[in-house]
């Protein structure tokens, strides 16, 4: 018994909003947890468009102390970049990583992230 999934488009302005608080709202919309028909094994979430991602804010000392790390899987391949530097180079990557890390680590994560559009 298949039911048709209705997806809405949510357009959110990120100007002067806190990064973590907005990312949790977006992750909830992408998963579909706000719908009464939510099932954890069904990808029934909505599409989300984020505008002005470069104007998002963080609290405290995060601009100078928060570090984003990734590894190239080669010896000595750990790369680190500070929040303020990443915001200058790729302002959309900060929000993308925040939402990505709030979604469950399963097979539905990739299709959910494809429904997320971030505009600087």
Image (cartoon, rainbow, N blue to C red):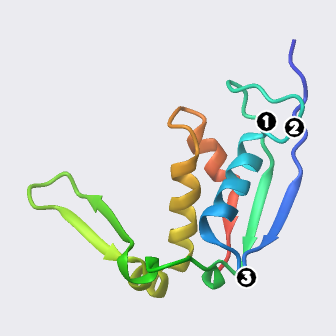
Q: Please name whichever residue, 90 or 82, is drawn nearer the observer in this view of the structure.
A: 82
Query: Marks 3 and 2, how far apart in space?
Result: 26 Å
For mark 3, give the secondary structure: loop
Residue at 62 percent of width and 51 percent of height: 113
Q: Position of residue 26 (x, y in %)?
A: 71, 56
Q: Position of residue 48 (x, y in %)?
A: 76, 59
Quarter containing the C terminus = bottom right
Labels 1 and 2 touching (C-beta < 8 A): yes
- Relative to residue 66, is residue 40 depicted above or below? above
The disc placed on residue 15 is 3
Q: Exactly how many numbered labels are in the figure?
A: 3
Report if the CB atoms under discs 3 and 1 are less than 8 Å apart: no
Above or below: residue 74 compared with residue 32 = below
Instruction: Work out whether 97 lies above or below 102.
Output: below
Which residue is at a point 86% across and 57% down the rendered structure image? 9
Looking at the image, the residue that sits furthest to the top is: 1
Residue 31: image location, x then y, percent: 71, 41
Q: Quadrant of residue 81?
A: bottom left
Q: Which residue is under mark 1?
A: 44
Quadrant of the image containing the N terminus: top right
Label at residue 113: none
Separation (CA) of disc 1 from disc 2: 9 Å
Q: Which is in the foreground here, disc 1 or disc 2?
A: 2
Residue on which disc 2 sits: 35
């Amino acid at each position: 018994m298949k039911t048709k999934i209705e997806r809405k488009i949510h357009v959110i302005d990120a100007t002067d909003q806190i990064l973590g608080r907005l990312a949790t709202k977006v992750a909830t919309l992408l998963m579909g947890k706000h719908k009464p028909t939510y099932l954890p094994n069904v990808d029934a979430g909505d599409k989300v468009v984020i505008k002005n991602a470069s104007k998002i804010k963080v609290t405290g000392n995060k601009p100078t102390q928060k570090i984003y790390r990734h590894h190239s899987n080669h010896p000595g391949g750990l790369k680190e970049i500070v929040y303020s530097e990443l915001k200058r180079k790729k302002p959309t990557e900060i929000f993308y990583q925040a939402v990505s890390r709030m979604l469950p680590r399963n097979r539905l994560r990739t299709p959910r992230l494809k429904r997320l559009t971030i505009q600087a």
